[in-house]
Amino acid sequence: MDLSFTPEEAAFRDEVRAFFRDALPPAIADKQRRGEELTKQDHVSWQKILYERGWIAPAWPERHGGCGWGPTRQYIFNTELGLSGAPRPIPFGLNMVGPVIYTFGTDEQKAQHLPGILTSDVWWAQGYSEPGAGSDLAALRMTAERDGDNYVLNGTKLWTTLAHYADWIFCLVRTSKEAKPQEGISFLLVDMTSPGISVDPIITIDRAHHVNQVTFEDVRVPVANRVGEEGMGWTCAKFLLAHERQTIADVGTKKRQLALLRRLARTLPAGAGMLGDDPSFRHRLADLEIQLSALEYTELRYLDAQHNGAERGIEPSVLKIRGTELQQKVTELAVEALGYYALPFPAPGDSAGNVPDLAPEGSRQALGDFLFARAATIYGGSNEIQRNILAKMLLRAA
Ligand SMILES: Cc1cc2nc3c(=O)[nH]c(=O)nc-3n(C[C@H](O)[C@H](O)[C@H](O)COP(=O)(O)OP(=O)(O)OC[C@H]3O[C@@H](n4cnc5c(N)ncnc54)[C@H](O)[C@@H]3O)c2cc1C
């Protein structure tokens, strides 16, 4: 097994690194550094820069406007993106519904939706979870009753990330109550301007507005907006979830966060010396570095196996569990290191104005990041569910 990069891959890494350093608009870089919330326009502007460079859709096939990169280039790109601190493209169009549409959609659906996803002119949201249907997604109850050339939708979607920005939402809906739970589900593309849709904010523990409750009351959706056959939505749903977990280890971002912790160790006074003089802090930092190295090599081994034609196995679940646990540990140590500097964290949307930051540079959002990281072991399939998947795959294989 060779886990080192070839000269071409190393050159590609340097090219990507230089691009992220030079192409991110200073105003967005500044907001990121200061821990300020990005607006929808900030996200769209940055994604358009990636689009112009031809790098907005690393995993999409070239014939659909993507880069057609293999797993190693995608890994390098994602790691450099995390290291740079540039915003990660919003996944709902690019990583989720886009691949579903180019794999299962009609030619008309591809022509209508793929260009807007690539240019980021159309913002998508994911309408899977409902009250009472999260881990047990097949229990979803939102109904879609056929009325001529339309479905009529009634029900509620919950935890819908950034639906307040969305132009379209893809939904799992129940088109039959007769069939087995999984077989009665269909996959619909819904225009958010359709009459009968309301979006109510849910404010999370970090005081931010990431998620929403979306209610559908007699919303009419053309049958032509269904992807795949009626009752085949579960196939699209499973395909999409595999894509959702692809970048979840996010090694690059954690490397950047650990670099910040190392800087805090050198610069934050603690007792008679600096924080880094404290053996218990040094021990915890070293422990996290080792865990991150292990995560990185697990991901590289997985890439190597994929490169050699291995089937997707337990690795996405392993990477999800370890990646999110480590995310929580890294953000926790940052908050502990900062102590009272972590406390006056800004409400999202606050600008720093002309008040100098109390917190050391780059750490203004540390408490917000720590608090929101609680959600990481829940979304994208909770870690308990990932452990169930691991147990089933490994024990069945034994
Ligand atoms: C910040 C955030 C953003 C999200 N964004 C979206 C989005 O954009 N679109 C969307 O559709 N959904 C989204 N979700 C929803 C997310 O997918 C669900 O929260 C997740 O699937 C868990 O479902 P639940 O919340 O209903 O919890 P439940 O399924 O009720 O689970 C509650 C607890 O029980 C555990 N549990 C449940 N079943 C089992 C089992 N069989 N074995 C062991 N333990 C079990 C779970 O692990 C969890 O700890 C988001 C969630 C969060 C927190």
Image: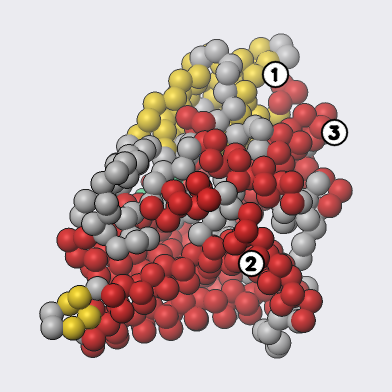
Q: Position of residue 152 (x, y in %)?
A: 59, 16
Q: How is the image coloured?
A: secondary structure
Identify the mark nearer the N-term, 1 or 3: 3
Q: Which residue is mark 3?
A: 107
Tell me the element at label 1.
strand
Q: CA distance from mark 1 to mark 3?
A: 16 Å
Specify the quadrant that holds the N terminus: bottom right
Q: Position of residue 201 (x, y in %)?
A: 37, 30
Identify the mark nearer the N-term, 2 or 1: 2
**Which is in the foreground here, disc 2 or disc 3?**
2
Query: Is 40 drawn above or below residue 257 in the view shown?
Result: above
Density class for disc 3 (Cα within 10 Å; few <14, some 14-19, many ≥20) is few
Q: Residue at x 49, y 64 (%)?
A: 253
Is residue 261 left or right of 299 when viewed as pictured?
left
Q: Is residue 232 visible?
A: no
Density class for disc 1 (Cα within 10 Å; few <14, some 14-19, many ≥20) is some
Mark 2 residue CB less than 8 A from any atom of ligand 1: no
Q: Is residue 167 visible?
A: yes
Residue 222 got which mark?
Answer: 1
Q: Position of residue 244 (x, y in %)?
A: 59, 53
Mark 2 residue type: Arg
Q: Tell me the quarter of the picture where residue 393 sits.
A: bottom right
Residue 17 got which mark?
Answer: 2
In-front residue for pair 156/84: 84
